Image (cartoon, coloured by chain):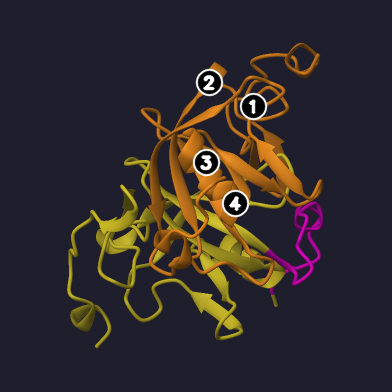
Chain colours: A yellow, B orange
Protein backbone atom coordinates (compact mmCIF):
# COMPACT_ATOMS: atom_id res chain seq x y z
CA UNK A 1 0.00 0.00 0.00
CA UNK A 2 1.13 3.48 -0.82
CA UNK A 3 1.13 5.85 2.12
CA UNK A 4 -1.42 8.40 0.99
CA UNK A 5 -1.81 9.81 4.49
CA UNK A 6 1.32 11.97 4.29
CA UNK A 7 0.98 15.57 5.43
CA UNK A 8 2.89 16.94 2.45
CA UNK A 9 0.10 15.59 0.24
CA UNK A 10 -2.51 17.40 2.36
CA UNK A 11 -0.74 20.69 1.75
CA UNK A 12 -1.46 20.51 -1.97
CA UNK A 13 -4.52 22.34 -3.27
CA UNK A 14 -6.13 19.62 -5.35
CA UNK A 15 -8.80 20.89 -7.72
CA UNK A 16 -12.47 19.85 -7.56
CA UNK A 17 -11.59 16.67 -9.47
CA UNK A 18 -8.78 15.88 -7.01
CA UNK A 19 -6.09 16.74 -9.57
CA UNK A 20 -3.18 19.11 -10.09
CA UNK A 21 -1.23 19.82 -13.28
CA UNK A 22 2.34 18.51 -13.27
CA UNK A 23 4.95 20.01 -15.57
CA UNK A 24 7.94 17.82 -16.45
CA UNK A 25 11.17 19.63 -17.21
CA UNK A 26 14.28 17.83 -18.41
CA UNK A 27 17.28 18.02 -16.15
CA UNK A 28 20.30 19.47 -17.90
CA UNK A 29 18.62 20.81 -21.03
CA UNK A 30 15.90 22.65 -19.08
CA UNK A 31 13.48 21.69 -21.84
CA UNK A 32 9.80 21.67 -20.86
CA UNK A 33 8.66 18.23 -21.97
CA UNK A 34 5.08 17.58 -20.91
CA UNK A 35 2.16 18.72 -18.86
CA UNK A 36 0.03 15.96 -17.40
CA UNK A 37 -2.23 15.53 -14.39
CA UNK A 38 -1.78 13.86 -11.04
CA UNK A 39 -4.11 12.82 -8.28
CA UNK A 40 -3.08 12.00 -4.76
CA UNK A 41 -2.39 8.35 -5.53
CA UNK A 42 -0.36 9.03 -8.65
CA UNK A 43 1.84 11.58 -6.88
CA UNK A 44 2.37 9.16 -3.98
CA UNK A 45 3.33 6.45 -6.42
CA UNK A 46 5.63 8.81 -8.32
CA UNK A 47 7.61 9.46 -5.14
CA UNK A 48 7.59 5.83 -4.10
CA UNK A 49 8.69 4.54 -7.51
CA UNK A 50 10.94 7.46 -8.45
CA UNK A 51 9.24 7.86 -11.81
CA UNK A 52 6.38 10.00 -13.09
CA UNK A 53 3.00 8.38 -12.62
CA UNK A 54 0.12 10.44 -13.91
CA UNK A 55 -3.66 10.24 -13.86
CA UNK A 56 -5.02 9.86 -17.35
CA UNK A 57 -8.17 11.97 -17.48
CA UNK A 58 -9.31 10.43 -20.76
CA UNK A 59 -8.75 6.81 -19.72
CA UNK A 60 -9.60 7.50 -16.07
CA UNK A 61 -6.77 5.41 -14.75
CA UNK A 62 -3.19 5.60 -13.51
CA UNK A 63 -0.65 6.07 -16.25
CA UNK A 64 2.95 5.13 -15.60
CA UNK A 65 4.66 7.36 -18.15
CA UNK A 66 6.74 5.11 -20.38
CA UNK A 67 4.88 1.91 -19.50
CA UNK A 68 4.51 1.06 -23.20
CA UNK A 69 7.21 3.18 -24.82
CA UNK A 70 9.96 2.76 -22.24
CA UNK A 71 10.17 6.56 -22.17
CA UNK A 72 10.09 6.72 -18.41
CA UNK A 73 10.52 10.05 -16.64
CA UNK A 74 12.90 9.43 -13.75
CA UNK A 75 12.21 11.97 -11.02
CA UNK A 76 15.15 14.03 -9.83
CA UNK A 77 13.31 16.77 -8.00
CA UNK A 78 9.74 17.75 -7.14
CA UNK A 79 8.68 21.37 -6.77
CA UNK A 80 5.41 22.99 -5.69
CA UNK A 81 4.33 26.51 -6.57
CA UNK A 82 3.26 29.35 -4.30
CA UNK A 83 -0.45 28.57 -4.70
CA UNK A 84 0.26 24.90 -4.02
CA UNK A 85 -1.78 23.87 -7.00
CA UNK A 86 0.89 23.04 -9.58
CA UNK A 87 3.74 20.53 -9.49
CA UNK A 88 7.04 20.87 -11.35
CA UNK A 89 9.04 17.68 -11.85
CA UNK A 90 12.69 17.83 -12.80
CA UNK A 91 13.26 14.57 -14.66
CA UNK A 92 15.69 12.46 -16.58
CA UNK A 93 13.79 11.57 -19.76
CA UNK A 94 14.62 8.00 -20.76
CA UNK A 95 15.18 7.70 -24.49
CA UNK A 96 15.26 11.48 -24.83
CA UNK A 97 11.67 11.36 -26.11
CA UNK A 98 8.71 12.58 -24.07
CA UNK A 99 6.05 12.90 -26.74
CA UNK A 100 3.93 10.11 -28.19
CA UNK A 101 4.65 11.62 -31.62
CA UNK A 102 8.32 10.65 -31.20
CA UNK A 103 9.54 14.15 -30.42
CA UNK A 104 11.69 15.26 -27.52
CA UNK A 105 9.00 17.57 -26.14
CA UNK A 106 5.23 17.76 -26.53
CA UNK A 107 5.52 21.50 -27.13
CA UNK A 108 6.61 21.23 -30.72
CA UNK A 109 4.13 23.63 -32.32
CA UNK A 110 5.13 27.28 -32.43
CA UNK A 111 2.84 30.18 -33.17
CA UNK A 112 4.27 31.74 -36.33
CA UNK A 113 2.25 34.61 -37.71
CA UNK A 114 -1.26 33.24 -37.31
CA UNK A 115 -0.41 29.56 -37.70
CA UNK A 116 0.83 26.75 -35.47
CA UNK A 117 3.98 25.52 -37.12
CA UNK A 118 5.76 22.26 -36.27
CA UNK A 119 9.31 23.20 -35.28
CA UNK A 120 10.73 20.07 -33.65
CA UNK A 121 11.80 16.92 -35.47
CA UNK A 122 10.44 13.41 -34.99
CA UNK A 123 13.35 11.51 -33.42
CA UNK A 124 11.76 8.10 -33.66
CA UNK A 125 8.78 6.83 -35.61
CA UNK A 126 5.83 6.22 -33.24
CA UNK A 127 5.25 2.84 -34.91
CA UNK A 128 8.67 1.81 -33.64
CA UNK A 129 7.93 3.17 -30.17
CA UNK A 130 4.52 1.51 -29.72
CA UNK A 131 4.81 -1.94 -31.20
CA UNK B 1 -11.46 45.04 -30.66
CA UNK B 2 -9.28 42.01 -30.39
CA UNK B 3 -9.60 39.57 -33.23
CA UNK B 4 -10.89 36.50 -31.45
CA UNK B 5 -12.05 34.88 -34.66
CA UNK B 6 -8.59 33.61 -35.63
CA UNK B 7 -8.34 30.01 -36.75
CA UNK B 8 -5.25 29.32 -34.63
CA UNK B 9 -7.40 29.99 -31.57
CA UNK B 10 -10.00 27.47 -32.78
CA UNK B 11 -7.34 24.78 -32.94
CA UNK B 12 -6.81 24.93 -29.19
CA UNK B 13 -8.68 22.43 -27.02
CA UNK B 14 -10.16 24.75 -24.42
CA UNK B 15 -11.46 22.94 -21.35
CA UNK B 16 -15.11 22.98 -20.24
CA UNK B 17 -14.50 26.36 -18.59
CA UNK B 18 -12.98 27.71 -21.81
CA UNK B 19 -9.47 27.71 -20.33
CA UNK B 20 -6.03 26.21 -20.91
CA UNK B 21 -3.03 26.17 -18.57
CA UNK B 22 -0.13 28.35 -19.73
CA UNK B 23 3.40 27.69 -18.50
CA UNK B 24 5.83 30.61 -18.56
CA UNK B 25 9.49 29.75 -18.99
CA UNK B 26 12.23 32.34 -18.81
CA UNK B 27 14.27 32.84 -21.95
CA UNK B 28 17.95 32.29 -21.38
CA UNK B 29 17.81 30.71 -17.92
CA UNK B 30 15.17 28.15 -18.93
CA UNK B 31 13.65 28.58 -15.49
CA UNK B 32 9.98 27.59 -15.21
CA UNK B 33 8.42 30.66 -13.63
CA UNK B 34 4.65 30.30 -13.40
CA UNK B 35 1.63 28.35 -14.42
CA UNK B 36 -1.49 30.40 -14.95
CA UNK B 37 -4.66 30.09 -17.02
CA UNK B 38 -5.80 31.68 -20.24
CA UNK B 39 -9.09 31.95 -22.01
CA UNK B 40 -9.55 32.86 -25.63
CA UNK B 41 -9.63 36.57 -24.97
CA UNK B 42 -6.55 36.59 -22.73
CA UNK B 43 -4.50 34.63 -25.25
CA UNK B 44 -5.61 36.95 -28.05
CA UNK B 45 -4.62 39.94 -25.95
CA UNK B 46 -1.30 38.34 -25.04
CA UNK B 47 -0.40 38.08 -28.71
CA UNK B 48 -1.70 41.53 -29.52
CA UNK B 49 0.10 43.22 -26.62
CA UNK B 50 3.20 41.02 -26.62
CA UNK B 51 2.88 40.34 -22.89
CA UNK B 52 1.27 37.60 -20.85
CA UNK B 53 -2.37 38.28 -20.10
CA UNK B 54 -4.03 35.59 -18.01
CA UNK B 55 -7.52 34.81 -16.81
CA UNK B 56 -7.69 34.96 -13.04
CA UNK B 57 -9.94 32.11 -11.96
CA UNK B 58 -10.28 33.47 -8.42
CA UNK B 59 -11.06 37.05 -9.43
CA UNK B 60 -12.85 35.99 -12.60
CA UNK B 61 -11.26 38.69 -14.70
CA UNK B 62 -8.41 39.36 -17.07
CA UNK B 63 -5.08 39.72 -15.36
CA UNK B 64 -2.26 41.52 -17.11
CA UNK B 65 0.70 39.93 -15.40
CA UNK B 66 2.76 42.75 -13.88
CA UNK B 67 -0.06 45.31 -13.95
CA UNK B 68 0.63 46.20 -10.30
CA UNK B 69 4.16 44.92 -9.76
CA UNK B 70 5.69 45.94 -13.07
CA UNK B 71 6.83 42.32 -13.39
CA UNK B 72 5.56 41.98 -16.92
CA UNK B 73 6.20 38.79 -18.88
CA UNK B 74 7.25 39.87 -22.37
CA UNK B 75 6.38 37.11 -24.83
CA UNK B 76 9.18 35.84 -27.03
CA UNK B 77 7.62 32.63 -28.27
CA UNK B 78 4.34 30.72 -27.92
CA UNK B 79 4.20 26.95 -28.08
CA UNK B 80 1.30 24.49 -28.09
CA UNK B 81 1.53 20.86 -27.05
CA UNK B 82 0.53 17.73 -28.96
CA UNK B 83 -2.90 17.53 -27.31
CA UNK B 84 -3.43 21.23 -28.04
CA UNK B 85 -4.56 21.83 -24.49
CA UNK B 86 -1.49 23.45 -22.91
CA UNK B 87 0.42 26.60 -23.84
CA UNK B 88 4.10 27.22 -23.21
CA UNK B 89 5.26 30.82 -23.26
CA UNK B 90 8.93 31.68 -23.56
CA UNK B 91 9.22 35.05 -21.86
CA UNK B 92 11.51 37.81 -20.76
CA UNK B 93 10.60 38.31 -17.11
CA UNK B 94 10.76 42.00 -16.26
CA UNK B 95 12.45 42.62 -12.91
CA UNK B 96 13.59 39.01 -12.81
CA UNK B 97 10.75 38.25 -10.41
CA UNK B 98 7.70 36.22 -11.40
CA UNK B 99 6.25 35.34 -8.01
CA UNK B 100 4.09 37.55 -5.81
CA UNK B 101 6.29 36.45 -2.88
CA UNK B 102 9.22 38.31 -4.46
CA UNK B 103 10.97 35.21 -5.75
CA UNK B 104 12.24 34.57 -9.27
CA UNK B 105 9.94 31.58 -9.76
CA UNK B 106 6.70 30.43 -8.16
CA UNK B 107 8.14 26.92 -7.86
CA UNK B 108 10.26 27.64 -4.81
CA UNK B 109 9.16 24.74 -2.61
CA UNK B 110 11.05 21.49 -2.99
CA UNK B 111 9.97 18.13 -1.65
CA UNK B 112 12.72 17.14 0.77
CA UNK B 113 12.08 13.90 2.62
CA UNK B 114 8.41 14.32 3.48
CA UNK B 115 8.37 18.12 3.70
CA UNK B 116 8.03 21.03 1.33
CA UNK B 117 11.12 23.11 1.88
CA UNK B 118 11.58 26.68 0.65
CA UNK B 119 14.72 26.64 -1.51
CA UNK B 120 14.65 29.95 -3.36
CA UNK B 121 15.42 33.36 -1.88
CA UNK B 122 13.12 36.37 -1.73
CA UNK B 123 14.74 38.87 -4.08
CA UNK B 124 12.50 41.78 -3.17
CA UNK B 125 10.10 42.29 -0.29
CA UNK B 126 6.49 42.03 -1.51
CA UNK B 127 5.63 45.22 0.43
CA UNK B 128 8.06 47.03 -1.88
CA UNK B 129 6.57 45.37 -4.96
CA UNK B 130 2.92 46.08 -4.16
CA UNK B 131 2.79 49.58 -2.72
In front here: B79 or B115? Answer: B79
Check if mark 3's residue and mark 4's residue have beta carbons within 8 Å.
no
> Mark 4 highlights which residue?
B41
Q: Chain of mark 3?
A: B
- Magenta stretch: dominant secondary structure: loop
- Name the residue located 36 percent from the left edge and 46 percent from the top edge: A31
State the extent of the magenta-drawn residues as a range: A2-19
> Mark 3 highlights which residue?
B46
Inter-mark Cα distance, 2 to 3: 15 Å
- Name the residue located 59 percent from the left edge and 40 percent from the top edge: B53
Inter-mark Cα distance, 1 to 4: 18 Å
**For the N terminus of chain A, which image quadrant?**
bottom right
Secondary element under disc 4, as helix, strand or loop, is helix
> Mark 2 highlights which residue?
B94
Q: Chain of mark 1?
A: B
> Mark 1 highlights which residue?
B66
Amino acid sequence: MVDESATWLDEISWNSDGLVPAIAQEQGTGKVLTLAWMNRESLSLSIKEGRAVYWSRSRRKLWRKGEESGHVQVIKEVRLDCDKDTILLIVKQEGGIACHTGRQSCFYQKLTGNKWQVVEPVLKDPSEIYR
